[in-house]
Amino acid sequence: MMYLKTSVGIEIRNEDLIISCLKSNFSRGVFTHFKRIPAYRTRNVEEVRKEIERYFKSQRLSRESIVLGIPRGDAIIRHLDLPREVEDNLKQVVLYQVQSFEPTEEEKFYFDYAATGAGQPGKRLQVLLVMVRKSVLDAHLEALGALGIRPATVSLGSVALANLFLHKRTDTGGKTFLLADLKPGSFEILALRDSFLIFTREAVREEAKAWKEVLLQELELAAGKIRLSPDDTIEKIVLAGEESEIALNELRESIEECELIGSTLPVEMPVQNRAHLQEAATSVGLAFSGLVRQPMLALNLLPSEQRLQRTRWAYVPTVLLSLIVLFLLAGLGLRQTIQERILGRKLDQEINALKGRVNRVQAVRAQAEALEKKILFVEGLIRQTDMNLEILQELTTILPPDTFLNAYRNAECTIQINGSSTSLDLIPKLERSPLLKNVQQRGTTFKDAQTGKERFTYEAKCER
């Protein structure tokens, strides 16, 4: 299969790295590769680097579009409700907010934000502000850099999961959805309303509690935090993570509107990757954020000076290749029609070139048929003439010497003879001839008074 773009999502999930690759075809993204690298922090750096390098090489994956997802616990999230008047200077207003959260001059934040309600008159601006301490993100980048990984984008795993769920959904207007990322020892709850992240909370799961009890408790807590009115409801709960299938089996009796995120993903995948879909959901979301042109929550915590800068010329080969592919596909679709037209044109040219020769051949053929008819007619006449000579010669041989013929007639091989003879047994003699058959007497015989001979009339058929 031919792919147009590749994006790799890498999630820092507890002590492991989860790597997922998405490749885009003409219809949608395809989840092509998955790998989990356990305990990458405590293992030998060179060993882990070689393992990652072998994986990228063996799967022929590009490192140009890597999206890194850092843990929710490393980030600080604030939801800002701002008046419409600050929209033109929103970036500066957000910067002031970030500076107010920085504890000291030395401890800075990397940050990014996403706003909803922008460009819509009469609505206040809802801003999702995500911050991470400079020292924390630098430590992650340094550790991953030693492993040969240089991300083009850094985001939160939970934000990527939200982007994956919200992509091209048309049923989120005025509705609230809960996403739960369930890990072996912890979980994160996300609340989405009107396609925007309005609440997120990460917590440790108590070992003694079942997932049903934990999630029902978190459901009540989230409902209070997002201030659901008595008439509002949570539309659906969507589960992701390694523990999601276990939790779904426990929740089905209590909550009908509950499903796995794997059933809603807008991606295709080979059969072998389906078993990893739930644990890879966040890393798939990270890769998906790098694949689509404009995710719902576009965030990049990587400082501008560390981002990969691409000039316009860097896109020229991709654009040219895309145009060539489109041209070839168009040619492939029109190939049969074009070939038929070319073949028809060639046949018309050859027919016109041979038209004069064909006319001459047809004229010669007509002349030959006319000559053949004349020849057959002449041959018939000749055969008839030759037959008369043979029959007359035969009659001269078989008739007695005193027999004379007065008349001979051949009409379409019916022979009639008139004459006189003293012999009365002429019919047997005539029938013994190989040239005559069916000899019959016509009329009666009578004696000629002058000659004293019997006058006769016989009729016979030609033998051939």
Image: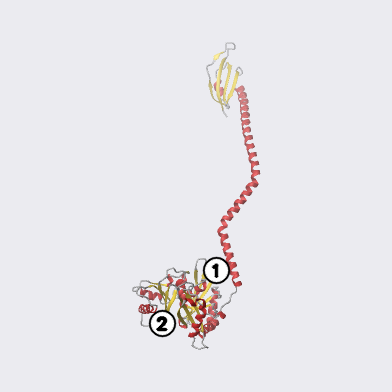
Task: Kindly indicate whether the residue at mark 1 contacts the one at mark 2 (C-beta within 8 angstroms).
Answer: no
User: Is disc 1 placed on a helix, strand or loop?
Assistant: loop
> What separation in Å lies between label 2 and label 1 (alpha carbons)?
39 Å
Image height check: is 339 above or below 432?
A: below
Please indicate, yes or no, whether residue 42 appears anywhere in the rendered image. Answer: no
| Type of amino acid under label 1 | Leu
- Residue 242 placement, left or right of 458: left
Say what amino acid the circle numbered 2 marks: Ala
Q: Earlier in the sequence, mark 2 or mark 1?
A: 1
- For residue 146, side relative to residue 250 (left or right): right
Question: In the image, is residue 236 above or below residue 402?
Answer: below
Question: What's the residue at 64%, 46% (across, down)?
Answer: 354
State the image coordinates of residue 404 (x, y, percent, origin top left).
60, 17
- Front of the two marks 2 and 1: 2
Q: Is residue 402 left or right of residue 222?
A: right
- Residue 362 sits above or below residue 164 on the image: above
The quadrant holding residue 222 is bottom left
Question: Would you call the spot at circle 2 few (<14 residues within 10 Å), some (14-19), or many (20 or more)?
Answer: few
- Side of 372 where 181 appears, left or right: left
Residue assigned mark 2: 203
Extreme residue toward the left, this view: 253
Residue 168 or residue 124, whichever sits in front? 124
Along the line of sight, which residue is nearer the eye, 103 or 20? 103
Whether residue 191 is visible to the viewer of this picture, yes or no, is yes
Q: Which mark is residue 4?
A: 1
Residue in view at x 52 percent, y 78 percent: 89
- For label 2, the SS is strand
The percent coordinates of residue 121 (x first, y second) are 47, 72
Looking at the picture, the colour scheme in use is: secondary structure
Rendered location of residue 408, percent (x, y): 60, 21
Whether 134 is drawn above or below 121: the answer is below
